[in-house]
Image (tube, rainbow, N blue to C red):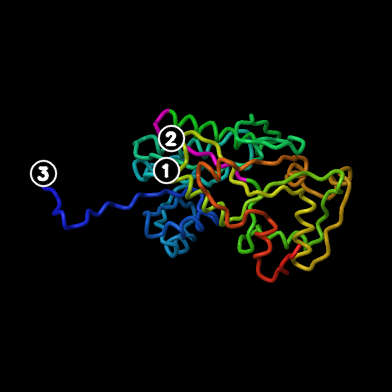
Amino acid sequence: MTLPHPSRPVRHPRPVLLIVGCGDIGLRVARRLRGRWRLIALTSSAARTGELRDAGIVPLPGDLDEPASLARLAGLADAVLHLAPPPAHGVSDPRTRALLAALARRGRVRRLVYASTTGVYGDRGGAWLDETRQVAPASDRAHRRVDAERQVRAYGRRHGVATTLLRVPGIYAADRAGGDPRERVARGTPVLAQGDDVYTNHIHADDLARACIAALHRGLPQRVVHASDDSEIRMGDYYDLVADLARLPRPPRIARAEAGAAFGAMQLSFMSESRRLTNRRLKRELRLVLHHPTVRQGLAAFPDFVPDTR
C-alpha cells in the first residue's frame, strides 16, 4: 500500500448532493454549495437542463411519477435534499415512495433532508407548537405530507440514514415566483376581519435555503425541525404590513362567513388554520442565525419598499 507523501495535501473527493425537486429553493441551495459539493438534480424536463448546468448542477433525467426512470439514483449520492411535492390528489405520496425505493437499491446515502409543511398540524386555534406536537392533518394535501414524512422516517431507520424533516410555513421573497406578497395586495384580495383572523408563519426563501444546508451538515437523526422565523403575526396584519411598506391600499377585511365566496378551497384551508411555531431546534441544533428574523425585517429589505421606522 502506497502512502501519500507528507508534503502533498490529500485530495478528498467532493461529497455528492442529489436535489430532488430543484426549483427556487433548490437553486438557492446550489448557489451556496457550488464548488464545495458535486451537485446533481433530478429533472423530468429537458428544457431545464441549461438552467441547471448554468447553476453548476448536473441534470439527471428522471420522473418521480415513473419509478422505472429512477434506476440511476441507486448509489449515486452521499446526501439527498428532497424538495419535491406530492401529487395533487390522494392521501399518500407515491413519489416519495418511488424515490426512497430507488435510493435503497444500493446503500450510499448517509443523510436525507425532506421539506415538509407545517400544514400537517391542522388548526390549533393559535396555540404555540413545538416539534413534539402530534400531527393532525385536516386536508388531503396535509395527509399526503404526513404520509411522506412517515416514509422518510421509516427509510432512515431501516437503512441507517440520518433524516431531517423540515416543516416549512409560507415562503416569501421579492425574487421568488409567487412569493412576492405585493402581488396579492395589489390585486385587492381581501383578508379576514380582525375577530376571525388566524396566526400564520413565514420563512424567507434565503433563510430556508440556509436551513436546508444546516440540516445537511448538522441535522440530528430522525429529527423534526420547524424552518420558521421568529414572527408572531396574524395573516391580515401581515398583508397590512406589506401594503404599508409598498405604499399600497390595505386589503379589505371580510367576515369568515363571506370567505367561501371570495376564495378557492386551498386558500380557505389556509385561512381556517391558526398556529404559532417555536423554532428553538432551528437555532440550537442546526445553529442557524436567521438573516431575516421577522417578516417586518424581511419585507423591509424588498426593493422599492419604504423603510419601516416603527
Q: Which residues are magenta?
A: 158-168
Which one is in front, 243 or 98?
Answer: 243
Q: Residues within 10 Å of mark 3 (few under 14, many from 20)?
A: few
Q: Is residue 58 left or right of residue 305?
A: left
Q: Which mark is residue 70?
A: 1
Alpha carbon distance from label 3 to label 1: 37 Å
Say whether marks 1 and 2 touch (CB < 8 Å).
yes
**Is residue 25 shown above or below 138?**
below
Q: Residues within 10 Å of mark 2 (few under 14, many from 20)?
A: some
Whichever of labels 3 and 1 marks the residue nearer the N terminus, that label is: 3
Q: Residue at x 40, y 49 (%)?
A: 17
Q: Which mark is residue 101?
A: 2
Q: Quadrant of the C terminus?
A: bottom right
Say whether marks 3 and 1 touch (CB < 8 Å).
no
How many labels were placed on the picture? 3
- Residue 301: x and y in percent read 65, 65
The residue beneath circle 3 is: 1
Q: Residues within 10 Å of mark 1 (few under 14, many from 20)?
A: many
Alpha carbon distance from label 3 to label 2: 37 Å
Q: Secondary structure at mark 2?
A: helix
Instruction: Assign the magenta stretch its main secondary structure.
Output: strand
- Residue 16: x and y in percent read 36, 49
Q: Quadrant of residue 130?
A: top right
Alpha carbon distance from label 1 to label 2: 9 Å
Q: Residue at x 55, y 35 (%)?
A: 149
Whichever of labels 1 and 2 marks the residue nearer the N terminus, that label is: 1
- Residue 35: x and y in percent read 37, 60
Which one is in front, 4 or 119?
Answer: 4
